[in-house]
Amino acid sequence: MSSIPLATDESRTSNLLPMVIIGVLFFIFGFVTWLNGPLTIFVKLAFNLDDVSAFLVPFAFYVSYFVLALPSAAVLKRTGMKKGMALGLFVMAIGSVLFGQFIDMRNYHGALVGLFVIGAGLSLLQTASNPYISILGPIDSAAQRVAFMGICNKLAGFLAPFVFGALVLHGIDALAQQVKAAPSPAAATELLNHFASRVYWPYMIMAALLVLLAIWVVRSSLPEIKPTGANSEGQIGHKGGSIFSFPHLWLGVLCLFLYVGVEVMAGDAIGIYGLALGLPLDATKHFTAFTMFAMLAGYVVGLALIPRFISQQRYLAVSAVMGVLFAIGAYVTHGYASIAFVAALGFANAMMWPAIFPLAIKGLGSHTEFGSALLIMGIVGGALIPQVFVHLKEHINFQLAFLVVIVPCYLYILYYGMRGHAVGEHVG
């Protein structure tokens, strides 16, 4: 299949179909990814877990990116990006079947394996789709295209808690009370078995849809892009060298690691945060949707401003400052006001991935797939940073723990937006 070059005015129309196809993919893995928030609440009740054990849900999901991103890059070198995306969807389908089956069997560790496999498929999908959309057009306007993908992603993320809540978590407060009031352990177990079984068919249906989507991608006219031509090293004044000769990439990997950590803290941990504030289960199951709504608003604003009024790197710095201010607001308030500030972090976070990813891969040339894989490995921040929070809050006030975990992350993101993204560039 022929490759397409860096987009020009004449090629913008031909890029519409790839944008639509990749947009559908971002919607799908956004829906799957942002199920982790309500899933954490689900397993906490279904398996009678403490917070540390329940947070193994995002840990198992996001750690797979670290383990499998580099193998994903090697696969993409052989398959190309199009077939790699389809393969990623097939792997996600396998993981969905495993998760649903093990939950139905009341095997928590097996369910975590299923989540790991879903994450493995997403690792392959994201390693292909993120650089694809970044270099589909000019790299300096990549934040716009990635932001459009982000809207698809977070629209799915906004819907996911409501869909999961309607199908699985309905009446969860009443169920929790029934379990507590059960006359015997056997009766409580019977209630929880029935509750856990609610997740089986939704995940089987999702697996079938993922297989159909994979077939659609393979049969589509989605073109291949060769990163060597579309993302040349010359645009940053680079003249050859190994992957270690791109300091802006390595600084970007750390930046993405920290960003995904704070994104998960705002989206997945908000439910546990609400429970710690004493808010009811029937309310906290929807809190992830509030963060997603704020992110959607952030994407709309970012699309309107970048790059016409502000550069993607400058907006990244502004977003980091907002993150610090909203984190402080969450700390000094209580109840739903504090939840509102945590959800508002979604607005601050919205344009971070769209800015960090293209800034970090700019000018990597033939190293683009490998550099993208390193960035995808950074998604493991979504596994580790919430673990720091959930362990720290065992020893100090949970609001203080939230503050001291995420503020340093935002300060580093501020540095990358202001200075770090340009380290090593030699363009006058």
Image (spheres, grey):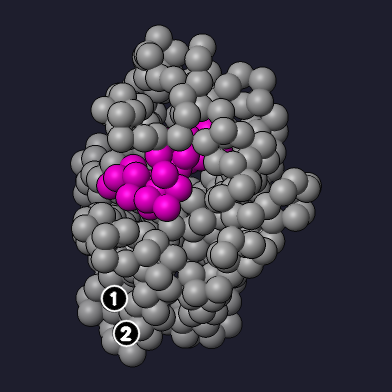
Q: Earlier in the sequence, mark 1 or mark 2?
A: 2
Q: Position of residue 91 (x, y in %)?
A: 54, 24
Mark 2 lies on a secondary structure that is helix
Mark-to-mark CA distance, 1 and 2: 6 Å
Q: Is residue 331 above or below residue 15?
A: below
Mark 1 lies on a secondary structure that is helix
Which amino acid type corresponds to the residue marked 2 in the rendered image? Gly
Q: Position of residue 256 (x, y in %)?
A: 54, 59
The quadrant where residue 15 appears: top left
181 inside magenta stretch = no
Which amino acid type corresponds to the residue marked 1 in the rendered image? Phe
User: Left or right: where does residue 428 sit relative to residue 262?
Assistant: right
Magenta range is: 124-151
| Tag 1 residue | 341
- Which residue is nearer to you in this view: 33 or 239? 239
**Is residue 382 visible to us here?**
no
Residue shown at 44% from the left, 20% from the top: 223
- Which residue is nearer to you in this view: 318 or 120? 318
Q: Residues within 10 Å of mark 2 (few under 14, many from 20)?
A: some
- Which residue is nearer to you in this view: 66 or 46? 66
Label placed on residue 322: none
Residue shown at 64% from the left, 62% from the top: 426
Q: Main secondary structure of the magenta part?
A: helix
| Tag 2 residue | 329
Q: Quadrant of the C terminus?
A: bottom right
Q: Residues within 10 Å of mark 1 (few under 14, many from 20)?
A: many
137 inside magenta stretch = yes
**Residue farthest bottom in this picture:** 332
Q: Position of residue 226 (x, y in %)?
A: 56, 28
Q: Are marks 1 and 2 in contact (CB under 8 Å)?
A: yes
Residue shown at 26% from the left, 28% from the top: 13
